[in-house]
Image (tube, coloured by chain):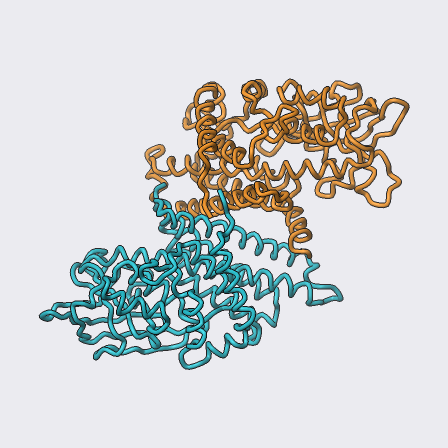
Amino acid sequence: MDFSLNEIQAMLADSVDKFIQNEYDFDTRQAYAESDTGFSAEVWSTFAELGWTAVPFAEDDGGLDGGPADIMVLMQQLARGLVVEPYLANVILAGGILRRAANAEQKERWLQPMIAGELHATLAFNEPQARYQLASVATTATRDGGDWILNGCKGIVLNADTSDLLIIPARTSGNTDDESGITLFGVAADSDGLTCNAYATYDGQRAAEVILDGVCVEDRAVLGEVDNGFADLDATIDEATLAVCAEAVGIMQVLKDKTVEYSKDRSQFGVPIGSFQELQHRMVDMLMACEQAQSTLMWAVMAGASGSEESKRAVSSIKYLVSTAGRSLGEDAIQIHGGMGVTWELDVAHYFKRLTAIGTMFGDADWHLDKLASASH
Amino acid sequence: MHVTFSEADLAFQEEVRAFFRDEYPDEIREAVSSGEELPPEMQIRWQKILFEKGWAGINWPVEYGGTGWTPVQKYIYAREEGNANTPVIVPFGLNMVGPVIYTFGSEAQKQRFLPDILASNTWWCQGYSEPGAGSDLASLKTKADLAGDHWVVNGTKSWTTLGQYADWIFCLVRTNSDVARRQEGISFLLIDMKTPGVSVKPIILLDGTHEVNEIHFDNVEVPVENLVGEEGKGWTYGKVLLQHERTNSANTFRSEYRLKKLREQAATSVRGAPPLADDKNFMRRLAAVEVELKGLEYTELRTLAAVSSGKAPGPESSFLKIKGTEIQQAIDTLYMDAAGYYALPYRADPSVGEGTETLTALRYFNFRKATIYAGSNEIQKNIIAKHVLGL
């Protein structure tokens, strides 16, 4: 039994921490978020140079052979800077599919440039009608000689407007909600018939509604087997869920620390507000929520790493906690900061907004609690 | 980062499993699973079985007859206890006064008291709270005045759990009132319950049980050699003891066992009603408690890993106490709600059948105590606010 970080994880944590402290203060982050692309290309190159974009990939593909624990460490640290660079879209989502499904030629064409920071990619895992149901894929792909024609609409595609490659799950057989009959396609963003309606999201990130109107791709765009893309999609989303949960736990810890600090500095009635028992108990609740979330996250990461049967349950458990306890922790952080908490100026509000966005991402609390309620174990 | 156990730990786990399978008497097993309060003679019998095996002093040092187990072994043992649903050990001797005596007591006290505690030959109870001193324990008024070779004790102790069976009581008493801080001048005294002037008055709890008592001391003469450690240092000793009490109150694996049973029960039909598993609201509530419990289990593991690597346990015990008791009560609530109307009969009645359902409400009522005893959960939050958050 060992809960400590290994040497590589400790180094990773340390290097991200240093980067955030030296080069990524809150004002810098805000400037990147408000730029046209929503992040800094320069920072992204740095991520690639430092090897962070290579973490979860096999050594043969130019990766570092990292596992869920390494991703956890990285995401928890990136969270401290509220980093807006598209790590989730590229490395976790698109990378998760490419790692599992791409053949040698596709890896060379897409994965290796992505790891090098030269190609941006994302995964269109959602459709407008799907809510959180991953198998709900109405977008169709039909044969046209040796090619495929794609038609449909993808919703909330993260960082789509800056991506060169969009990975599109499309239905090649079966009904809209069937798990079988889904095929994954790698589609160039500049394909004819592909429209990307991009917008900012409330957490300082960017997403888009993507319309596919008779988009034609070659057969070599198919990632993995025709009709059998769901397993890779599902495994990638589980991994991505863990990754955003790690980010959320990192944010929870920051919010807790900032709130405790603020309550010691801020005086009212001639005493620090942290001397009031009502606020003290709330902050103890925040601390306990952080500890519970950290513990559950570690369970999920270890279950994920060992590929054990309980890993699905663990993913839903941590997501449920992050979406519930995380939300009330965020609300308490705002409340204890008082009027300052509801200003744009203070970083606390932006941590809260990101935490809230994660609460919804890949299934909200109700969605995951339902899975846990019906699971037999 | 991993939670796999070593070969030696796995072998130990097998040994514990086999022991509970083979040596846990059916009679006691059935009494425990009935949910009724375990009669004292069964309690003692079980503790003696553990003593014979050498497993009575889980946390005790080897030199006093303890197991000398590693933190991981203790964790494994607790998990197997939960899985086997063994009786909860009466903590006052083995987990409370024992550690105080072997840590702070004189050689004579160790020789006199420890063997009987370990073998469960003596039944101990705790004299801490008083009618006027609950959360504010330092305001206790029971006093002991020195008169030659003995102390004369006067006062009242309250909420004394299972004191009606006790041979001995350990008490915090005021031996000096002329002190700067109220925490000073308190001493740790061992009192024979048969001493003239000691009287026990039952307090009946809301579920109708006689579990706790008020103990009166009327000019009770206690030999000076029964004072543990230094005079006036009782508060310090008592705090050490309370940390033991709180860590023990997380009860993670007991809770896990009860949730597992509840899931099984929910999958079956009772009295021809549809299985509760069809009730989405109930199952969601159950699942939410399972999530919290898993988090607590890993928090406990993380604490254990820290202790294994040489860090001292501190205010984590308060955390475990708060979460553990909250979860315990949440499970009590689920059981009672699962029983529906049939939680209502006060005692099991043949005409009603399904005897354990009636006990669900009684347990729910009884265990409101869990967030109050061992320092209320609000006091625990004060401790964490001060010692962890620095507020």
Question: Chain A: what color?
Answer: cyan
Q: Compared to B44, does B314 lie above or below?
A: below
Where residue A354 sits in the image (x, y, percent)? 47, 67
Outermost residue to the left: A145
Total marks in image: 0
Question: Chain B: what color?
Answer: orange
Q: Compared to B35, does A254 lie above or below?
A: below
Q: Compared to A190, does A292 lie above or below?
A: above
Q: Nearer the viewer, residue A127 or B62?
A: B62
Residue A133 falls in image quadrant: bottom left
Q: Residue at x 49, y 23 (%)?
A: B31
Residue B362 in sight from this viewpoint: no
Where residue B367 sits in the image (x, y, percent)? 56, 37
Q: Is residue B78 left or right of residue B162?
A: left
Q: Is residue A113 left or right of residue A32?
A: left
Q: Nearer the viewer, residue B13 or A369?
A: B13
Q: Residue at x 54, y 53 (%)?
A: A289
Q: Nearer the viewer, residue A191 or A102?
A: A102
Where residue A74 sits in the image (x, y, percent)? 46, 61
Image quarter hosting the C terminus of chain B? bottom right
